[in-house]
Amino acid sequence: MQRDQNEPFDQDEGDEALSKSEIKREMLALQTLGERLTRLNPQQWEAFHFSAQMLEALRESLRIKSHIALRRHYRRLGKLLREEDADLVRRLFERMDNAHMQDVKHFHRLERWRDRLLSEGDSAVEQLLDEYPNLDRQHLRQLLRTAAKEQQQGKSPTAARKLFKYLKEMAVD
């Protein structure tokens, strides 16, 4: 059924259809997902359970060197992602991003403990041992003494690095 040009547009028809802007935003979002996928290791692609065609397109992206060709390829990946479960891809990326943020937060907590131990000395050691009784008090103090000595002599902070590594190995959060 064709609509007469003078006849008003029926709102019911327009409610179901997406606007051109919404379609474009969705395609750009899928292209961005495709671009992020190309930055992952090929082993990580298996977690997404893609079709053979999508996996082949992702493998092809490894061979492309030209910036313009990569842009064109991202558009192709976006089109292929329309046929895949894009919500699953988004959820997996959110999970990976969250895990990365947790790792970064853990790293910063370790750095703060190390800096605090180096600046406050025994009082910080006692607080750390109260929270983490599995740490070796003697080894911890030895690392702190060596780090302080290195700092006074202007040497590279080898002991401070060892202290950080020890805290990391003992899973101090």
Image (spheres, grey):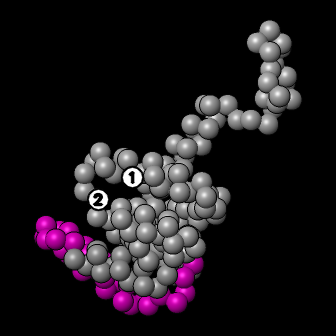
Q: Is residue 120 above or below residue 33?
A: below
Q: Residue at x 36, y 47 (%)?
A: 71
The three-letter code of the residue at mark 2 reads Ile
Residue 127 picture location, percent across and down: 52, 74
Examine the structure image and report whether residue 93 is included in the region drawn in magenta.
no
Q: Tell me the SS state at disc 1.
A: helix
Q: Which residue is mark 2?
A: 64
Q: Is residue 115 left or right of residue 37?
A: left
Q: Tell me the SS state at disc 2.
A: loop
Q: Which sits in the foreground, 24 or 167? A: 24
Q: Which sits in the foreground, 127 or 134? A: 134
Q: Is residue 5 left or right of residue 100?
A: right
Q: Residue at x 61, y 58 (%)?
A: 83
Q: Residue at x 34, y 69 (%)?
A: 118
Tell me which numbered mark, 2 or 1, is placed earlier along the sequence: 2
Magenta residues, start to end:
131-157
Residue 32 picture location, percent across and down: 48, 49
The label number, if any, that marks residue 172 in the structure image = none
Examine the structure image and report whether residue 148 is included in the region drawn in magenta.
yes
Residue 45 picture location, percent across and down: 48, 71
Q: Residue at x 44, y 77 (%)?
A: 43
The label number, if any, that marks residue 73 in the structure image = 1
The reply to whether residue 49 is in sight is yes
Q: Which sits in the foreground, 66 or 142? A: 66
Real-space Cα separation, disc 2 to disc 1, in angstroms: 9 Å
Q: Mark 2 near mark 1, Cβ–Cβ under 8 Å?
A: yes
Q: Which sits in the foreground, 126 or 72? A: 72
